[in-house]
Image (cartoon, grey):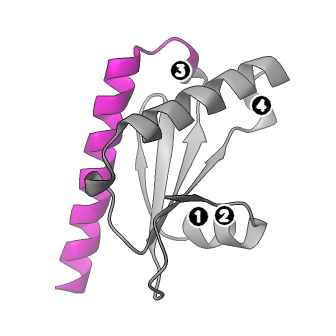
Amino acid sequence: MDRLRQRADFIAVANGARMSRPAFVLQGRARDDDGPIRVGFTVTKKIGTATERNRIRRRLREVVKRVDGVAMRPHNDYVLVGRRAALDRGFSVMIDDFHVALERIGRGRQSRTE
């Protein structure tokens, strides 16, 4: 699993499917290449101070690390946009939210292609 770092990649994913949860918004997009799964993290300045934004980003990174790679589809890009609720939300609840969001994004993509 790789990290998204280029602004163009973040913008491309923003045009894909999206699923909103209390602690984050998950955006996903299928790519046409055979590359690995790529994940990006972002938290806007509206959320709070730099310390709070960094803490949210760290929590989101840990959620992705703890979720098995099988739940994410190969050849896809994902972006997690952090929300303020990520500071107080229980970690196990955030992991469950991430699983639900991945499932719904994948299900929505399947119904469009069939």
Which mark identifies residue 37? none
Q: Are marks 1 and 2 in contact (CB under 8 Å)?
A: yes
- Residue 79, by quadrant, is bottom right
80 lies above or below 32: above
Real-space Cα separation, disc 4 to disc 1, in angstroms: 18 Å
**Mark before the other along the chain sequence, 4 or 1:** 1
Q: What element carries label 4?
A: helix
Residue linked to disc 1: 14
Real-space Cα separation, disc 3 to disc 4, in angstroms: 13 Å
Q: Specify the amino acid type for callout 2.
A: Phe
User: What range is drawn magenta here?
Assistant: 87-114
Residue linked to disc 4: 46
Real-space Cα separation, disc 3 to disc 1, in angstroms: 21 Å
**Mark before the other along the chain sequence, 3 or 2:** 2
Residue linked to disc 2: 10
Residue linked to disc 3: 85
Real-space Cα separation, disc 3 to disc 2, in angstroms: 22 Å
Q: Is mark 1 on a helix, strand or loop?
A: helix
20 lies above or below 28: above
**Percent x, y for residue 71?**
27, 53
| Quadrant of the rendering where the C terminus is positioned | bottom left
Q: How crowded is mark 4: few (under 14 residues within 10 Å), some or many (20 or more)?
A: few
**Mark before the other along the chain sequence, 3 or 4:** 4
86 lies above or below 30: above
Q: Specify the amino acid type for callout 1.
A: Ala
20 or 4, which is in the foreground?
Answer: 4
Front: mark 1 or 2 = 2
Q: Is mark 3 on a helix, strand or loop?
A: helix
**Percent x, y for residue 102?**
31, 52
